[in-house]
Image (cartoon, helix red, strand yellow):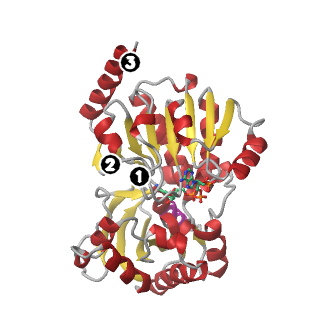
Amino acid sequence: MSKFCFVIHPLSLEDVVRYEPGARGKGQPIIAKILEWMPAYAAAHVVGVRTPDGRETEGWFVAAPLLPQQMLEFPRERVYERILKAIEIGVELGAEVAGLGAFTGVVGDGGVTIAERSPIPVTTGNSLTIAAGVRSLFRAANEMSIDAAGTTAVVVGATGSIGAACVELIAPRVAHVILVARNETRLRKFHERIREELPCTSSATTDIAEAVRRSDLVLTATTSTSEVIEPEDLRTGAVVCELSLPHDVSRRVAAERPDVLVVEGGNMRAPGDMHWWRVREPGTPFDMGLPQGTALACMSETMVLALENRCESYTLGRGIELAKVREIDALAERDGFSLADMRAFDLPITREHIARTRAAAEQRRAVSA
Ligand SMILES: NC(=O)c1ccc[n+]([C@@H]2O[C@H](COP(=O)([O-])OP(=O)(O)OC[C@H]3O[C@@H](n4cnc5c(N)ncnc54)[C@H](OP(=O)(O)O)[C@@H]3O)[C@@H](O)[C@H]2O)c1
């Protein structure tokens, strides 16, 4: 089977400490300054990803160690250079296809320029992220006994690479879909282009709070570096599926809205006995804050391409074809990938948690009736 590399970067200071425990105790300005000049490096060796029919791949997480804000603010060429250096390190280790994690797949034109300059094919992994995100949203709705067909759903980040396809996949299963983004012109043009094709009614707005207040189902896929979903805006018993990395659902939701079910939408269980070993300290696990055996959907797409010997630039830029989303979803299923158990705010969601959430929603409805 082919081998892969996946470019990662820290999403927060906590991530920096996870990647580099020696950074603990250092202040944000010092860490940011160090990262500014820190070269790309091989962070983890990924082994044990094995399909039910015995195909196996291995790969490397290669860090392009910039924070999300730095990815957005630094001169684009400098960021591209860091990402390409990371891919080159992956190639030296044997990778034949590269995945772009989080903002490394967002910066600039969503991987198109990186793919043109890369020595191996590149994918953002967004096709499988879209499939996993939509599945996660409706799984959570099901857990809350919400009949999705009568609901209003909002996609926050609807003009994005992930969000636009999510709108199309969610629309056939709800009564109304609201599209949200900041750039009004792009949002209006996108909405005008697709509204006739959508099987449900739809609307578009730049007012997130107003859209969230009207929605039973919320999916976020933004590149915001701050929180955009606030507890006071959420409807009673709402379901929120968060695909954005870094997180964009306020951490206050966990404490202040026990009636709302929030799920991280892009986590998958990998087949086989997957382990991530630190490259610099062999035998020590590499911690990305995910449970053992779990990978992000974008990583999983890269692994599936390697397992399938499909070393091609599978997903790039905006305007992702639904046919590709369906194809990679089917390939992932065949290779033994499945949605990971539900999680939110870095914790697993237990049956008791869901029962408590449902009860809190019922109580809140009874009070407001
Ligand atoms: N969970 C996973 O496995 C996984 C995998 C890949 C990517 N991701 C994450 O998914 C997110 C989206 O990625 P993408 O490739 O779709 O990015 P993208 O193509 O750049 O789209 C981002 C979308 O978010 C909107 N947006 C940005 N800031 C916003 C804000 N403050 N409020 C409302 N909307 C905002 C943008 O529109 P405007 O600019 O008009 O606002 C656009 O619609 C990123 O956070 C990425 O890291 C997760």
Q: Position of residue 192 (x, y in %)?
A: 77, 42
Q: Which residues are magenta?
A: 301-308
Q: Which residue is mark 1?
A: 267
364 sits left or right of 180 in the view? left
Q: Position of residue 182 (x, y in %)?
A: 62, 51
Mark 2 or mark 1, whichever is nearer to me? 2
Q: Is residue 304 magenta?
A: yes
Magenta stretch mostly in which secondary structure? helix
**In the rendered image of this protein, does residue 82 appear above or below residue 184?**
below
Q: Quadrant of residue 108?
A: bottom right
Give the label on residue 345, or none: 2
Amino acid tagged 3:
Arg
Mark 1 or mark 3, whichever is nearer to me? 3
Q: Which residue is mark 3?
A: 365
Which residue occupies 38% across, 77% down?
32
Mark 3 or mark 2, whichever is nearer to me? 3
- Nearest to the observer: residue 126 or residue 159: 159
Q: Is residue 159 magenta?
A: no
* Numbered disc 1: secondary structure: strand
Give the label on residue 218, or none: none
- Nearest to the observer: residue 292 or residue 356: 356
Confirm if mark 1 falls within 8 A of ligand 1. Answer: yes
Amino acid tagged 2:
Phe
- Nearest to the observer: residue 121 or residue 102: 102
How far apart are the two marked residues, 2 and 1, measured between alpha carbons?
A: 13 Å
Amino acid tagged 1:
Asn
58 sits left or right of 28 in the view? right
Q: Classify 10 Å Cα crowding around label 3: few (below 14), some (14-19), many (20 and above).
A: few
